[in-house]
Amino acid sequence: MSPDASPDSRLPIPHSLLVFYGGTFDPVHLGHLAIACHARDVLDCTIRMMPAADPPHRAPPGTDAAHRARMLALAVDSEPGLQVDLRELGREGPSYSVDTLRGIRAEYGDALPVALLIGADSLLGLPTWREWTALFGLAHMVVAERSGSALDLRLPPVLAEATAGRWVDSAQALRGSPAGRLLRLQQPMHPGSATEVRRRIAAGCGWRELVPAAVADYIARHRLYGLNGAATPASL
């Protein structure tokens, strides 16, 4: 399976911090790109966006992995410092973050600083993830949150205990160790969500302004998400 562009997950590492941003990207929208670009600028490193094949913690995606990967490739094509990493699409079965990170460690070793870029809601749901406490030994976490959201006050006790003493206040601090630290990435969050994009398409409402132009054209061309009828299958 290959997207319209063929990014290589084994490109040379340009910086000492390797950052992965996973998700279904169903479809990728401007909010996803805003988070990725802000993280790229703050962390001064490439952001590798990983489309999930079979996310175990949510309903099946609205369209298949081949379409989602192609749309993601189109979205990052004109954005320097963003790459598509297809490693999760090559695995059978559910895509668990702990397994992905273990594979990354097997590929790059234990000494390289590695980070997951996640949203605040994902952090709050971390105790529901498979082997979630093992994640701290495998990677840092960069948490994208709205400015002034008072995330600390929302942490459940088990998560507050697990993250105590791990928070740092600079990207440089992440480079000082391979894993185990958390950094807030505060920014004005872009409106819209993949759920909203799909809802608007299905309802025949305006949706193009929520996604990159090339992605909008792709959705229209392949009639995805119920746009004017059933979606066409991806050609592999």
Image (cartoon, rainbow, N blue to C red):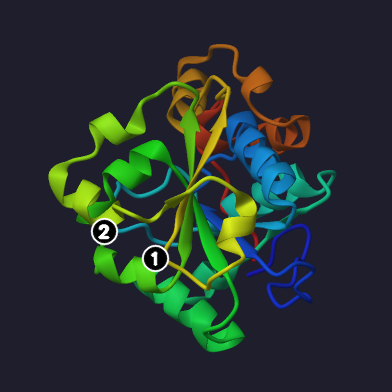
Q: Nearer the viewer, residue 209 or 79?
A: 79
Labelled pair 2, 1 in contact (Cβ < 8 Å)? yes
Q: Position of residue 113 (x, y in %)?
A: 58, 71
* Foreground residue among 100 and 164: 164
What residue is drawn where x is 35% and y is 72%?
93
Label 2: few (<14), some (14–19) or many (≥20) C-alpha neighbours in 10 Å? some
142 vs 48: above or below: above
Q: Is residue 124 positioned above or below 180 on the image?
A: above
* Residue 67, visible in the rendered structure: no
The image quadrant where one finds the N terminus is bottom right
Q: Residue at x 36, y 57 (%)?
A: 55
Give the answer, above or below, for where 178 lies relative to 191.
Answer: below
SS at mark 1 in the image:
helix
| Front position in the image: 222 or 187 | 187
Left or right, 14 with respect to 148, comes to right
Q: Amino acid at mark 2?
A: Trp
| Residue designated by label 1 | 97
Give the side of residue 80 with respect to residue 43, left or right.
right
| In the image, farthest residue toward the left | 157
Q: Position of residue 189 (x, y in %)?
A: 55, 25
Q: Amino acid at mark 1?
A: Ser
Which corner quadrant of the image does residue 109 belong to? bottom right
Label 2 sits on residue:
129
State which quadrant residue 13 falls in.
bottom right
